[in-house]
Image (cartoon, rainbow, N blue to C red):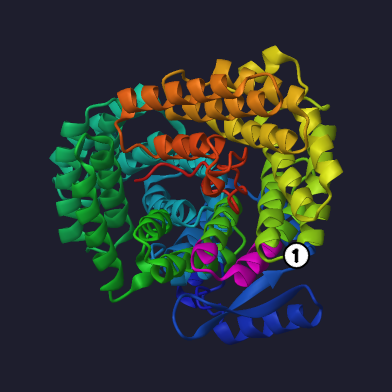
């Protein structure tokens, strides 16, 4: 309602000159009585709310028909009025997350007018581009809306301006940002940077934006030194012009950190930069300006530093921001729930983590097909967590359903995810003392054709899972299947690795227990493994200690009995892999 300025409406002849705002209010009340429109209270980012109009589809359709049959002069008047009203409405900064609810109501209107205004005059083009550029910032920062279409519309509007006009250059930038990639994008950003530097100055926000993107493409081409040098210039400029905690400043700082980490010896420097990012966000007068992707990466850094509570705050801030309005960033929000759940596990707050997992699984079940990979993975991780909480029966039911879905989806073709899930089920069945079923499941996995086993054993996680299955079979006396699997693993593992020596030790011991290897031959092979480990990794290597323990057990030391499962362990709860959305590039 605030943006329906009577003077603006009269100036463009949208209302008669003698038309009063009081009469407008009476008309709105009448339409509201007829349920053709409603008035709701929304926040524009401040403490107070503002009234806004929601209109019945019949009214919208009538307006569309009126515009369709109107002459060009009338259409131009309506466009000028709409643009001027939106100029007032979009003065609220889109960079502040507190304003995003307000912008979520405005952006469809901006999209409509920028996408439907054909060949506007300069009088309309300039303010319309200003409105559209602010709207583009909101869409980018809030992960909302079709930015590619928005960029195309902005470029089309800008063509009515001269080539070196600042707004036309800005529209070119948004088009390159949203629609170009690779060398084409790099060349355009470089050209825009040169032009804007000359026309607007080196430290104009638009110049800094193009400078940032060009420097980022330098890094993508492997030119890290030059990229770092240019990004430091951008960072200095953005700090001076926009402030340390502005989302674009933080974005530049984050990309700079990525570049440092990609360089040899750059990790220590990256640590210092992360501390600066943390201080910039937490010393800001308005922390709501912080860039969400920077908060995300900061959360990971804090997790690695074991600053769990601070990392949790980052993840919750992102979730709250993305939950406040419907967004196309929902996948990002789901990923943040996963980060939060993992963070809570690290803090030992398993019940809270389970609640977060349950909420995410429930949300995915509502929005994804049952065969969706993210849903399957989340249900698996939730089942793992239930094991740690002692809720074994629930975990087993969930894990069985995960296996059934994957088997049905993949037509019973073995892959590393299926093997991992079957491996977890075997451990779960053993814990529930369902020994026969655990062994049966392990046998089905190890009885694959040998060439398939060898091929899969090239993957480290699969080797770990298969090794566990082989030990389960050995414990149950199924030595033939266990030896077959271990031999396949030996063919796939890097021959000089610690892992190869570990698998060889298990194979030797299994062959001895099954009667295929004499006591003396077993000792000789174990001594050979120790000698090889000492030669490759030194006398203090951990695998040497494990092999000596097995050898001492063979020689009769009751404290060092030659068990097969000296390394057998439960799978870790949850996945440490962060499932990131394909987020848009930084600006």
Q: Predominant secondary structure in magenta?
A: helix
For the point 56% across and 53% down, the residue is 335
Q: Quadrant of the N terminus?
A: bottom right
Q: Is residue 19 left or right of residue 432?
A: left
Mark 1 residue element: loop
User: Which residues are drawn in magenta?
Assistant: 343-359
Whole-percent x and y of residue 370? 80, 45
Q: Return the x and y of residue 41 as percentages of the image width and height.
A: 60, 81
541 sits left or right of 332 in the view: left
- Residue 561, located in which quarter of the rendered image? top right
Q: Which residue is mark 1?
A: 391
The answer to whether one can see residue 242 in this image is: no
- Judge by depth and name the residue closer to the eye, 530 or 151: 530
Residue 453 on image: x %, y %: 67, 20
Asked if residue 356 lies in the magenta stretch, the reply is yes
Rendered residue at 43%/21% (across/down):
528
From where the camera sits, is residue 528 visible?
Answer: yes
Q: Is residue 269 above or below residue 393?
A: above
């Amino acid at each position: 309602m605030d943006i329906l300025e009577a003077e603006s409406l009269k100036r463009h002849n949208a209302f008669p000159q003698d038309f009063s705002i009081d009469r407008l209010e009476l008309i709105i009340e009448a339409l509201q009585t007829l349920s053709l429109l409603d008035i709701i209270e929304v926040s524009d980012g401040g403490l107070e709310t503002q009234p806004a109009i929601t209109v019945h589809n019949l009214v919208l359709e009538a307006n569309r028909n009126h515009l369709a049959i109107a002459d060009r002069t009338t259409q131009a008047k309506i466009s000028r009025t709409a643009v001027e009203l939106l100029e007032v409405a979009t003065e609220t900064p889109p960079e502040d997350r507190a304003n995003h609810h307000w912008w979520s109501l405005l952006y469809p209107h901006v999209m409509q007018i920028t996408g439907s205004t054909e060949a506007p005059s300069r009088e309309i083009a300039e303010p319309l581009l200003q409105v559209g550029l602010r709207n583009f910032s909101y869409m980018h920062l809030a992960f909302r809306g079709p930015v590619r279409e928005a960029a195309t519309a902005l470029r089309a509007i800008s063509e009515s301006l001269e080539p070196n006009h600042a707004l036309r250059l800005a529209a070119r930038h948004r088009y390159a940002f949203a629609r170009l990639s690779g060398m084409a994008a790099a060349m355009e950003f470089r050209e825009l940077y040169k032009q804007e530097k000359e026309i607007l100055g080196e430290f104009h926000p638009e110049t800094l934006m193009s400078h940032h993107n060009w420097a980022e493409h330098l890094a993508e081409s492997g030119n890290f030194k030059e990229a770092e040098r240019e990004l430091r210039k951008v960072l200095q400029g953005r700090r001076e012009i926009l402030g340390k905690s502005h989302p674009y400043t933080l974005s530049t700082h984050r990309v700079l950190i990525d570049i440092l980490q990609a360089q040899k010896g750059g990790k220590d420097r990256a640590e210092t930069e992360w501390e600066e990012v943390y201080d910039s966000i937490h010393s800001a007068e308005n922390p709501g300006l912080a860039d969400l992707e920077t908060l995300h990466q900061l959360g990971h850094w804090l997790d690695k530093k074991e600053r769990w509570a601070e990392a949790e705050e980052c993840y919750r801030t992102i979730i709250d921001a993305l939950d406040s309005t419907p967004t196309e960033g929902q996948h990002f929000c789901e990923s943040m729930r996963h980060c939060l759940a993992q963070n809570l596990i690290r803090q030992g707050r398993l019940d809270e983590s389970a609640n977060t997992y349950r909420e995410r699984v429930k949300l995915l079940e509502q929005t994804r097909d049952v065969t969706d990979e993210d849903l399957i993975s989340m249900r698996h991780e939730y089942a793992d967590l239930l094991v740690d909480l002692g809720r074994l029966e629930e975990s087993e039911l969930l894990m069985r359903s995960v296996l059934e879905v994957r088997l049905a989806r993949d037509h019973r073709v073995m892959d590393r995810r299926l093997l991992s899930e079957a491996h977890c089920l075997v451990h779960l069945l053993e814990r529930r003392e369902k020994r026969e079923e655990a062994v049966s499941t392990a046998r089905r996995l190890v009885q694959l054709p040998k060439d398939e086993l060898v091929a899969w054993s090239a993957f480290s996680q699969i080797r770990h899972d298969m090794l566990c299955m082989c030990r389960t079979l050995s414990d149950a006396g199924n030595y033939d299947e266990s030896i077959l699997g271990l031999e396949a693993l030996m063919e796939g593992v890097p021959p000089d690795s610690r892992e190869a020596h570990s698998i060889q030790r298990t194979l030797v011991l299994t062959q001895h227990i099954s009667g295929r290897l004499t006591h003396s031959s077993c000792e000789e092979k174990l001594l050979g493994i120790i000698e090889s480990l000492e030669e490759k990794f030194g006398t203090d290597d951990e695998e040497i200690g494990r092999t000596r323990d097995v050898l001492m057990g063979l020689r009769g030391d009751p404290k060092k009995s030659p068990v097969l499962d000296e390394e057998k362990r439960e799978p870790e709860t949850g996945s440490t892999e962060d499932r990131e959305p394909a987020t848009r590039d930084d600006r």
